[in-house]
Each structure stands twice: as structure tokens, then as C-alpha cells.
Image (cartoon, rainbow, N blue to C red):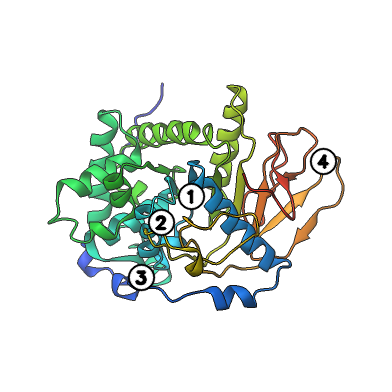
Amino acid sequence: MTKEHKKPHLTFYPMAERHNLVKRSDFGVVPDRPASVQALLDCIPSIHAGKTFRQAIDAIVAARTNGRPVLLGMGAHVIKCGLAPLLIRLIEAKIVTGIALNGAGSIHDFELAAFGETSEDVGKELARGRFGFVEETGAWMGRAIHQGAASGHGLGHSLYEAMNASRELFPYRHESLLWQCGKHGIPCTVHVAIGTDFIHLHPAVDGASLGAASFRDFEIVCDQVGDLEGGVYWNLGSAVVLPEVFLKAVSRAHNLGRHLQGLTTISTTVTLMAVITADTIDDSRVPRMSSTQTTAMMPRVLQLIRTSPNVLVSDPIGGHSAHRHRCPSTVFRYDDQPSATTAAATANSRIRSQPMIHATNSPKVA
């Protein structure tokens, strides 16, 4: 007979007592009228990093020009490093059509919406038995997830509903990716690995609700990936969870007979930043990325990308030695061919199973 598990009495403390390493006052600012980047682009060589920089821009612009989706899968550091205000521009400009977060990303976003601060000092609090034991975050998120799951909602939508219900509790919700996605009617899903997020320590967080809500979000992402033909999947700073979610979603799409020809995957590490303006501009104001690209209605897509080298390892089929590409961002062209190269979807991770994502130096854009 299984012995009933008795939960220990844990001690929590108020958010006001926690020393946070990140404050909203430290975040980047989006200028009203960004300066031209034509001079910067003219200085970038059209080899290696400079080439993939242009390929990334071409792919995103082509996808949105043709009405195809751009799905962004991102790790938590993108938020805690202060880039949410710039990503919100991508949402407002209708460049990004969906965002997938890991659990930590949702926590940073939620805390910033509520308190304007996030990211505790782990080294300081761990030995004191206080790391992860702030009261409000676990209690509020736990209630939101439980209520959302009971209504059949995904985790991301559940947190949006909590923010949307109380401007008083979430005075900075306008700076939240979760809230902005909900406001603009695009999915923001959250993909949780049980035990990896500190809110899992809180008794208000129910494992069944957490699993049901995150599983619903997985189903939503699967539907999004199944419609990515001619679109873009952009992995930004997630090394484990979201590449694995994406891989399974691609496999599901094939199992259902979906076609993913023309899908481009872009993998970049933190830090990326892009400033997008929602207005369209004339040819004289738009950097031309290729002679064949129509730019009359092209948005100003990426003002600046800064990423780290060594962002992928790709393994040719057949057991040949891997070749490490040294470039700030890596662009893949999905070609649906069984003989294509299997490539990692993110920094330093290897994906060795079909469906294949084919690395190419100069992917054509639809």
C-alpha cells in the first residue's frame, strides 16, 4: 500500500524583501524614430556572419510579405536581459505571429508585469534556504494556472487572463510579452519542465493543472508548426526545452501529412536585438538585402543583431565528423528531403532524427 505523501511546511517570504538583480528601469528603450542602419549594413561583409545576417532578414521579410507566419521560440534570458520592449515592437508590427516561452521566461515576464523587477540573487539566497521562496510569484501564478487549466486554457493564456483581470496587481502589464500577445490575439505558449522553475516549490502550484495547461500549449504550438510552410521558426536563446518542443511538433506535422517546404529556421543566441517599426516605408529608407527582394512595402526589420559565435553543430547523415560553423546566426532552409543534413535547432545541441532540417549557405526565400 502506497504511503500518503505528507507535504512539509515550507517558509515563504514577501517579494518586498527579495533583492532582485533585474529592474525594469534597466531595460532598453525603443526610440520613436530609429536612425538609419544603411551605413551599418553597407559595412558588413557578405561572408559568414554578414551573409547569415542578411539571410535572416530576407527570410523574415519574405515570410511576412507573403502572409506566412513567423514563430519565435525563446529562452528566459531574452526577457531578463531587458529585450521585451523591443520584442513588443515585433508583435505590434505583426512581424512575429506567435511566441513560445519556457517556464522561466513566463516567470520573468509575470514578475516584471507585477513588480517591475525580477531575477533574484541565487548565490546569496540559496544557502539561506530562501532561493525560490518568494510568496507572491508562486501563489499568484499557481492560482492563475489552476483557474485557466480548469477552463481548458493553455498556460500562457491563463497568465494573460490573470494580468488582464487586474491592472492594480499588474501595473506594468503593458511591458509583458504574455499580455501583449493576448491583447493582439496571437498565441504566447509556455512549455514547462517539471521541477525546473522555483514556483514548483509553492503549494499553490498544482502539478495536474501545470501539466494540463502546458500540454494544451504544446498542442497549440504543434498546430502552429504544422502551418509553417513558407514561414520562419526563430529559436532565440533556448538551448534545450524549445528545440525539443519544436522537433516533436515537426515530427507531428509530418505524421499528419503536413508540408513544410519553404520553412526557414533561424537560431541565434542572446543577445539579439531588433527594432521594428509598424509603418511601411519607401525604397529610399529600406536597406536592400538582395537584388530580387521587393522593398517598396518592406518594414524596417532588424536594426541590430548581436549574437555569440558557435551557435550550432550540424552532423551529416552517415556518421561523418561534425563541422562546427562559427557565425553569429545560422539560417536553415527546410527542403523535406530524406537525404538532407540533420542540424541543431539551437546553440550546441544536436538533433539527429528525421524530419531533417538542411543547412545551406544561401537559402532561397519564397
Residue type at tag 2 = Leu
Crowding at dot 2, Cα within 10 Å, few <14 / some 14-19 / many 20+, comes out as many
Residue 288 lies, in percent from the top left, at 58, 64
Q: CA distance from mark 2 to mark 3?
A: 12 Å
CB of mark 3 within 8 Å of CB of mark 4? no
Residue type at tag 3 = Val
Q: CA distance from mark 3 to mark 4?
A: 44 Å
Which circle's residue, 2 or 1, is located before the other in the chain? 1
- Judging from the image, what secondary structure is the residue with disc 1 in? strand
Q: Nearer the viewer, mark 4 or mark 1?
A: 1
- Judging from the image, what secondary structure is the residue with disc 2 in? helix
CB of mark 2 within 8 Å of CB of mark 3? no
CB of mark 4 within 8 Å of CB of mark 1? no
Q: How many marks?
A: 4
Q: Which residue is mark 1?
A: 72
Q: Which residue is mark 4?
A: 317
Q: Residue at image x 35%, y 35%?
A: 213
Vertical relation: 306 (above or below) 183: below
Q: Residue at image x 25%, y 58%?
A: 174
Whether residue 10 is visible, yes or no, is no
CB of mark 2 within 8 Å of CB of mark 1? yes
Q: Which residue is mark 3?
A: 30
Name the side, left or right, on which 25 lies relative to 269: left
Crowding at dot 3, Cα within 10 Å, few <14 / some 14-19 / many 20+, comes out as some
Q: Residue at image x 66%, y 61%?
A: 52
Disc number for residue 90: 2
